[in-house]
Amino acid sequence: MNVRDWLDSLSARERNLVYAAGGLLAMAVIYLVLVMPFQVSGKKMAARVEKKSADLAWMQASAPQAMAAAGIAQAAGKESLVVLVARTAREAGLGDALRDQSPDGNAGLRLRIEAASFDLLMTWLASLQQRYGVTIDSATIDAAAPGLVNATLSLKQAGAAG
């Protein structure tokens, strides 16, 4: 006996009840298979976005503190500012251009650079600031030749007072 024969053997009222139950079962399966997973994953994604937003807000609030601590920690290493400037200038290819270095206050340094590549000088200064927390108090840069500059700089070690 197949399903068609079984349905034919039922009365009209029973057949309608079986069709209604089948329809409800089909709707329940469609809901469970198609709708519910999207609702659950949508809620999970919303919770994840909320958590990531909170993490981002915390990171943005903590970033200045972390950057300051990293700059101070690196700058407060074993090297004095004079040694740090001389070493990094040589590494950047500015060793021959570095002329005079003299202390400027407690944690400051005045230096003169002559006939240096402008691009190398800017890259070196950015590296000093980003990697070692050295700040530029003042800078005077004059053109010496095409692509070359003379510079007088006043630098300070990160975390230095005054």
Image: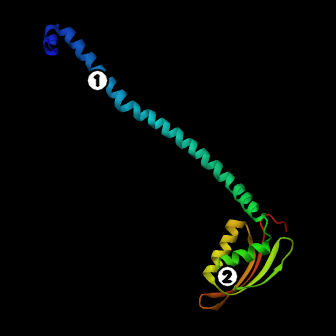
Res 67 → quadrant: bottom right
Residue 101, above or below 35: below
CB atoms of marks 1 and 2 within 8 Å: no
Quadrant of the snapshot with the C terminus:
bottom right
Q: Nearer the viewer, residue 1 or 142?
A: 1
Q: Residue at x 48, y 35 (%)?
A: 43
Where in the figure is residue 107, as x and y percent of width and height? Answer: 83, 70
Q: CA distance from mark 1 to mark 2?
A: 78 Å
- Along the horizontal axis of the image, is 50 left or right of 1? right
Q: Nearer the viewer, residue 132 or 29?
A: 132
Q: Residues within 10 Å of mark 2 (few under 14, many from 20)?
A: many
- Along the horizontal axis of the image, is 126 left or right of 153? left
Q: Residue at x 60, y 80 (%)?
A: 119
Viewer-nearest of discs 1 and 2: 2
- For the residue marked with disc 2, what is the amino acid? Leu
- For the residue marked with disc 1, what is the amino acid? Ala
Give the total of numbered labels. 2
Q: Nearer the viewer, residue 110 or 51?
A: 110
- Looking at the image, what colour scheme do you see? rainbow
Q: Residue at x 69, y 52 (%)?
A: 62
Q: Which residue is mark 1?
A: 26
Where in the figure is residue 19, as x and y percent of width and height? Answer: 23, 17
Q: Which residue is mark 2?
A: 94
Ranked by sequence position, the earlier of labels 1 and 2 is: 1
Where in the figure is residue 23, as x and y percent of width and height? Answer: 27, 21
Residue 36, disc: none
The secondary element bearing badge 1 is classed as helix
The secondary element bearing badge 2 is classed as loop
Q: Residues within 10 Å of mark 1 (few under 14, many from 20)?
A: few
Quadrant of the snapshot with the N terminus:
top left
